[in-house]
Amino acid sequence: MIKYLEKTGRTEEEAVAAALEELGMDRDDVSVTVVERAKSGFLGIGASPAVVRVEYEAPDEPVAEAETPATEPAQDYPEIRSFLTGLLSRMGTKADIEITARDSKGIVVNLSGPNMGAVIGRRGETLDAIQHLTNYVINRGNDKHMHISVDAESYRAKREESLVRLAEKMAAKVIKYKRSMALEPMNSYERHIIHTALQDYEGVTTSSTGTEPNRRVVVSYDRPQQTGNKPQSREWA
């Protein structure tokens, strides 16, 4: 069975070498097609690494798996991969780039590698900047907007879990001491997580105060009502 693997690199030779190392094969064992030649950009913007497709012979799949009709390979989104590879190269780091379609309008990119701390940055600020820049460059000039979510080592999911725990811990303190408490400054996405986590938490309400980048969530004590529903949190922005 013929299979293929696409790899990127600063040059065609580097991309081929990376593919051979992953497959554990020699150059004579594969067939190489250059999908895209490397292009230089300005300050990392528009930089495009070389993309090669390496075809190789693989053992036939088991019969149980072969019963599924063959389908075309999933789209690899070469523009996104090329842009991020170039951008990360300018930042002095490398990463494995996994790209999957979340739905008809969204793309999820997960970066992994040995130096993801620098990619994530303080409270995810560098990661947010990478995501913003990727969306701007990829969607520029396109009629249909495609939302691209960029994550690194599942940082966003881990951060969300941490914020939910923080919100519940803070709410418990507010109820215990019956006074308002403010959290550390957060971006709008993180504030939204706090508001959502506490919107049905009996005994507290939430609001946002301050100006960017020092805007923060305030958790306030709300005496339980005798009748009616709990008031909604105020000013979630």
Image (cartoon, rainbow, N blue to C red):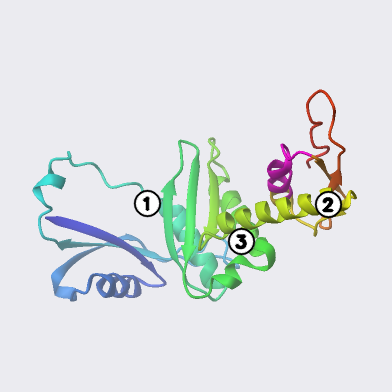
Question: What residue is pinned by disc 3?
Answer: 127
Residue toward you, 176 or 82:
176
Residue sitting at x 68%, y 63%: 123
Residue toward you, 56 or 37:
56
Mark pair 2, 1: CA separation: 52 Å
Tell me the element at label 2: helix
Q: Is residue 153 left or right of residue 175?
A: left
Which amino acid type is marked by label 3?
Leu
Front: mark 3 or 1: 3
Question: What residue is pinned by disc 1?
Answer: 76
Q: Residues within 10 Å of mark 3 (few under 14, many from 20)?
A: many
| Viewport quadrant of the N terminus | bottom left
Q: Are marks 2 and 1 in contact (CB under 8 Å)?
A: no
Residue toward you, 231 or 39:
231
Mark pair 3, 1: CA separation: 21 Å
Please say whether residue 211 is visible from this viewpoint. Answer: no
Q: Is residue 209 left or right of residue 26?
A: right
Between disc 3 and disc 1, whose residue precedes? 1
Please say whether residue 31 is visible from this viewpoint. Answer: yes
Residue sitting at x 14%, y 74%: 28
Front: mark 2 or 1: 2
Q: Which residues are magenta?
A: 191-202
Q: Residues within 10 Å of mark 2 (few under 14, many from 20)?
A: few
Q: Give how far across and how far down residue 159 sits, in percent.
A: 62, 58
The quarter holding residue 68 reads top left
Which amino acid type is marked by label 2?
Lys
Q: State the count of labels.
A: 3
Q: Give how far across and how far down residue 17 sits, in percent.
A: 29, 75
